[in-house]
Image (spheres, helix red, strand yellow):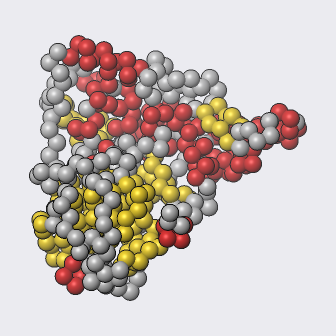
Amino acid sequence: MVDEKEKKFLTVAPFQCAWRKDLKFREAGRGCVAFDAFAHNDVTVVFRENVGSKHYHYKRDNSPHYTVILGSHRNRRLKIEVDGNTVVDEEGIALCCSSMFQSYWISVYDGLISVGKGRYPFQNLVFQWLDSNPNCSVQYVGLSSWDKHVGYRNVNVLPLQQNHMLMWKQVDSGDYEGKEDGGEGLEEDKMEFERWGLENFLESWELADVFFIVGPEERPVPAHKVILQASGNFFAKSSNEHVMHLPNVPYAILHALLEYIYAGRTQISESQLRSLWDLSKQFEVMPLVKQCEETIERFKLNKKLFDSGKNVELSYPNSRPLCCTIFPSGLPVNAQMLKQLRLTGEYSDVDIHIEGYGLVAKSHKVILSLWSAPFAKASAAWLPFSTLHIATCPDVGNV
């Protein structure tokens, strides 16, 4: 078993490859690896269906795989290989640095390989290549080298879901096609959608447009700007910030705050209650601030109200499932603020155009997906784009 020190830092000798069972995509063919690398050249990352050999370069690998080489040809080129055959050989892209660690991320999405630089995955994209015959079975990530030692640290494998398609803008997406005999499918969609709610988007990369970096471990936690801003005061006016740093906030505290916003309820230990109160005040989530204050006062008056070792439950008044109610009933989301954000188009991520009328609305994908089954069902088809065109519409005034 690899100890914690090795997890944080490892050195790969020339012509070898380090494999760890924890460096694995959650979904075959789809995932992202983010890491820091220190090398003169040839930072090499291998993607395979199964864990490979330590002496990767010495043995012919007969199983399908992708290999991405940063700083090939003495730190002059970017190379991508498929099953050992070079398919990309580009000059001056994603080069290494011999004087310090540099941060990179590489994602694979059904044969679409994306390479970026910087500490934050899915930002600062520098190169993409689409495999016309994609390998959708690769899952394990190997860290390799060529003729010099390569140091790796802060290696993390992250899920890659629909929202990351925002940057795949040059990749064509087919039109969404409904079923011809859609009666039965429509009923199934309706039943599933009735159980749909904002809670489904809690800490989901689905449609997320901002993420927090929390704690000393720098854990990324996704969220949605329109929901956050309608629940408190998370962003400065007209802010384009996509990353929020909370180095002194434990993940459990942020999770409790987001769970309260997205689900209308949360649980937390009594010892963490004051930290949650502080974070709620920082972002002005006033219903949670009030509940924390009241709970702390009750605890001071009578500690027996709380069973030792058990979590404190905090629920927004009249919290209940979102279905069949007027948004945002049961959630600490300010309806007037939500309306204002819709009218101004602030934090919008999709423009709605109707044929003959032009631009009719600047909207928010997460809101559309919450209240429209067709949007939710067809989200994979329109997610990569920021403009939605509708051919006809019976009543533009209701858009």
- Quick check: 340 above or below 385? above
Provide residue 384's location: percent of width, then percent of height: 25, 45
Residue 166 visible from this viewpoint: no
Question: Quarter-wise, where is residue 181 in the image?
Answer: top left
Q: Residue at 47% across / 55% down in the picture?
A: 220
In the displayed structure image, the side of residue 70 where residue 290 appears, left or right: right
In the displayed structure image, the side of residue 339 where residue 313 appears, left or right: right
In the displayed structure image, the side of residue 361 where residue 217 appears, left or right: right
Q: Nearer the viewer, residue 201 or 141?
A: 141
Q: Nearer the viewer, residue 159 or 389?
A: 159
Provide residue 143's location: percent of width, then percent of height: 34, 69
| In the image, farthest residue toward the right | 301
Q: Residue at 16% across / 28% down in the picture?
A: 177
| In the image, farthest residue toward the top | 183
- Quick check: 54 above or below 234? below
Q: Nearer the viewer, residue 82 or 117?
A: 82
Mark count: 0
Q: Residue at 71% across / 48% down in the picture?
A: 272
